[in-house]
Amino acid sequence: MTRLRALVTAPLRGDGLDKLREFADVVYDPWIDHTPLRIYSAEQLAERASSESADVLVVESDSVSGPVFDLPLRAIASTRGDPNNVDVPGATKAVIPVLYTPGRNADAVAEMAIVLFAATRHLITADADVRAGQAFRDARSPTNGSGRGRWQGNPPASSGSAPSPKP
């Protein structure tokens, strides 16, 4: 059995790249290592894959369509959550499986959502106010006096809890 040859234009490292090298000879040339950044058109990618005698393509941003499907490829892997750079119907018609990585950046998206939530809801300044004993000053929620989230009246002095915010 002939060993596979993979052209990898995606930034790939660690266990994934090591695993790929176990069953294929890898030509590693990620787009991000080029100045200016290099992203292949379908024609350029087909030419490069042909010159490397690639059986497998691993891409992130390169356009995979048209002439790429004329090559004798065994598989196309897109390191994206949604392979929108790959003409999946064209690959299907050419009987070339397309692999992709749904949820690849789910952790990063969740972390960014938390940061954006904290920033837009003034959680950082609110935390500082609470820690400094300045919560609910001037009948405002702990938003550093911005007026966003204004309470209906002053918090009761005896219970130490705040009334429900005004809708």
Image (cartoon, grey):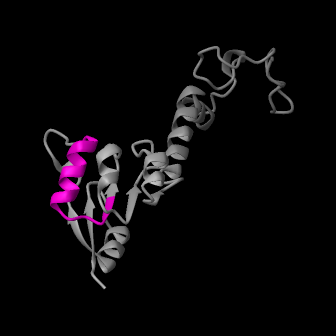
Please state which of residues 15 and 44 is positioned toward the viewer in this rendering.
Answer: 44
Residue 76 located within the stretch drawn in magenta: no
Viewed as shown, does residue 128 lie left or right of 138? left
Q: Quadrant of residue 158?
A: top right
Residue 45 located within the stretch drawn in magenta: yes
| Horizontal and vertical percent position of residue 147 | 64, 14
**Looking at the picture, does residue 12 appear above or below residue 153?**
below
**Looking at the picture, does residue 166 appear above or below residue 126?**
above
Number of marks in picture: 0
| Horizontal and vertical percent position of residue 109 | 51, 44
Q: Is residue 144 visible?
A: yes
- Quadrant where the N terminus sits is bottom left
| Horizontal and vertical percent position of residue 75 | 39, 63
Q: Is residue 39 visible?
A: no
Viewed as shown, does residue 127 lie left or right of 158? left
- Which residue is depicted at the point 52% across and 38% down? 115
User: Magenta residues, as a range?
Assistant: 39-57
Please state which of residues 25 and 138 is positioned toward the viewer in this rendering.
Answer: 25
Please state which of residues 67 and 52 is positioned toward the viewer in this rendering.
Answer: 67
